[in-house]
Image: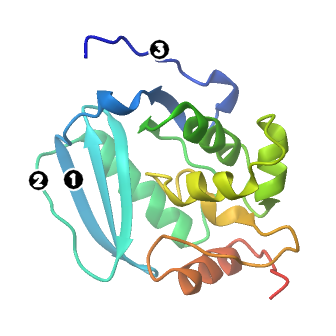
């Protein structure tokens, strides 16, 4: 291996999630995790050091181990979001993926609360106008949904085309309603 990956903070994304976008083989094991109930089921958040590396929504409580101030802050901000009191997260995240995935996630992070973009919009913004389906794959592999709001990405017609978090489309509908976003469905 021995390959050195370029890490950079996306300062253009502040305020909001601060990013370190790391290469795929640079994944580190989580050092702490929390899990709590929410309106969309159990939310589990993992951190390595002081950076959030994963968020999962499911019907079951996730693992809890270690302790981290960033996880306590994440829980606080996520609960405020679910209560309709927070519209922008300010949490450090470290995302592992391909360069293509990271370019998509960076665009998703720029979508403001209450707004949507299409997969084609993101494909155009990253300079790959024919890559809408590949963008969909990258959206679906977002390791920190909610914090990087992939629920705000819709089909070209404004329809919900899928969602990999929680219960899938019902979870996405709930999140869109929370943000007062109407879909064409």
Across and down, in percent, residue 136 comes to 64, 59
Helix, strand, or loop for circle 3?
Answer: loop
Cα separation, mark 3 vs mark 1, equals 26 Å
Image spot of residue 147 (x, y percent)? 52, 52
How many C-alpha atoms fall within 10 Å of the one at disc 2: few (<14), some, or many (≥20)? few
Q: Quadrant of residue 27?
A: top left
Which residue corresponds to the image point at 80% horizontal and 80% vertical from the top-left? 183
Residue identifier under label 2 = 65
Q: Are marks 2 and 1 in contact (CB under 8 Å)?
A: yes
User: How many marks overall?
Assistant: 3
What's the distance in space between the residues labelled 2 and 1, CA to CA? 5 Å
User: Which residue lies at the image location 25% right of the left edge and 80% below the top edge?
Assistant: 60
> Of marks 2 and 3, which one's residue comes earlier in the chain?
3
Which residue occupies the extreme right position in the image?
Answer: 157
Q: Which residue is mark 3?
A: 6
* Distance between mark 2 and mark 3 Cα atoms: 30 Å
């Amino acid at each position: 291996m021995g390959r050195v990956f370029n890490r950079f903070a996306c300062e253009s994304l502040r305020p909001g999630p601060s990013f370190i976008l790391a290469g795929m083989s640079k994944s580190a094991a989580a050092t702490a995790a929390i899990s709590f109930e929410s309106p969309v089921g159990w939310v589990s958040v993992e951190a390595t050091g002081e950076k959030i590396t994963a968020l999962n929504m499911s019907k079951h409580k996730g693992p809890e181990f270690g302790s981290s101030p960033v996880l306590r802050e994440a829980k606080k901000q996520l609960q405020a979001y679910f209560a309709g009191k927070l519209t922008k997260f300010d949490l450090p995240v470290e995302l592992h993926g391909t360069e293509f995935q990271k370019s998509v996630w960076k665009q998703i992070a720029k979508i403001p609360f209450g707004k949507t973009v299409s997969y084609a919009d993101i494909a155009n913004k990253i300079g790959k106008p024919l890559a809408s389906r590949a963008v969909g794959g990258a959206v679906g592999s977002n390791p920190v949904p909610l914090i990087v709001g992939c629920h705000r990405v819709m089909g070209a017609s404004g329809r919900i085309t899928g969602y990999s978090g929680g219960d899938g489309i019902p979870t996405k509908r709930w999140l869109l309603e929370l943000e007062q976003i109407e879909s064409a469905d």
